[in-house]
Image (tube, rainbow, N blue to C red):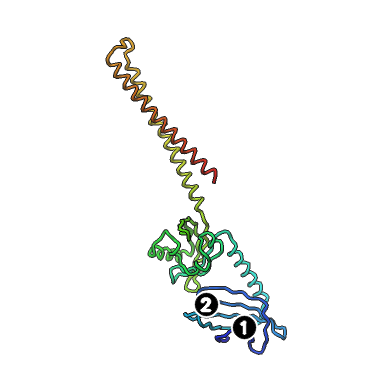
Amino acid sequence: MYLINKRPKYFGFFDFFKLSLVCLVFDFTTMLVIEQFTSLSGVVLLVLESVIFTLSFSTAYYLIYYRPFHHSFQNSLELLNEFETVLRTTSDGFWITDIEHNGRILFVNDAYCEMIGYTRQELLQMNIRDIDCNESLEEMKNHFQRIIEKRHDRFVSTHMTKSGEKIEVEVSVTFLNINQGRFYVFLKNITQEQQLKRNMLGQNEKLYEIAFLQSHQVRAPIVRLLGLINLINYEEFNDPENKEIIHALKDSTVNFDEIIREIINKTNDLYQLKQENDSK
């Protein structure tokens, strides 16, 4: 194992020819570089370099370890490449965040960049608080602690896009106790599904209102009309009380008409809401 401040083209007594390179960025100060080389004697070697940056990013030191290459590790590298490809190309967003800096974003895939409107470079300078609209810093710390204790959580949150629009996301997070703790987070944009759910609740509410109007408020003026009709003196139409009854009948009829109009309006609103849901 060696610690140097310049990456060598030659190592030991061998002249290496590079065959492949895989980089895994774990955080802003450390990068692990895995390289496969073939020596002039035909021996395949694996070189692992832990690149450690100073705070000023002006100097990099390479902690180098090498050993003979094994095909089982090659399979692991291929699996790692496949895993990274899946994470970068999945339709769901994906994060890796730390804990010690209140959820600083260490890795983010293309899907979340497209979902939120920020570039990867911008997101890697941000933490969860810059995006999440649901929780204060204290609430977020308490939530972090609950996730650490349970090791997993699933919940709905609201994120602010770069354009200022709020989107609703379903969050599935897993905690692993490595590198002072990491959150591995999948995020799905469910804004449209949530809006459809609210519309459905609105439809059900309007249906309830219509049923209530039909079963209660419509019945009341009908009962009044029937009662007033029974009070009419058909034998003496000039009875002064008939005039009062007729005025009362008119008032009840107008009230009945208003209730019918209200039912029609609510039915039209319900139809319009259904049309909006069907078009989505």
Identify which residue is drawn at 56% across, 83% down: 63
Vertically, is 266 above or below 156? above
Q: Is residue 159 at least partly visible in the picture?
A: no
Label 2 packing within 10 angstroms: few (<14), some (14-19), many (20+): some
**Residue most extreme to the front:** 163
Q: Amino acid at mark 1?
A: Tyr
Q: Residue at x 52, y 80 (%)?
A: 52
Q: Earlier in the sequence, mark 1 or mark 2?
A: 2
Q: Nearer the viewer, mark 1 or mark 2?
A: 2
Residue placed farthest to the bottom in the image? 13
Horizontal side of 199 relative to 75 (left or right) equals: left
x, y (%) of residue 228?
Answer: 33, 20
Could you tell me which residue is drawn at 59 percent across and 74 percent down?
23
Q: Residue 280 bears which disc, if any?
A: none
- Residue 88, located in which quarter of the rendered image? bottom right
Q: Amino acid at mark 2?
A: Thr
- Residue at 47%, 41% (x, y): give it: 203
Q: Residue furthest left?
A: 240
Quarter of the image containing the N terminus? Answer: bottom right
For numbered disc 1, what is the local secondary structure? strand
**Image spot of residue 160 (x, y percent):** 46, 59
Q: Is residue 234 above or below residue 83?
A: above
Image location (x, y in percent) of residue 124: 50, 69
Residue nearer the viewer, 8 or 144:
8
Q: Which mark is residue 66?
A: 1
Determine whether, in the image, residue 36 is placed left or right of residue 53.
right
Q: Disc 2 on helix, strand or loop?
A: strand
Residue 30 image label: 2
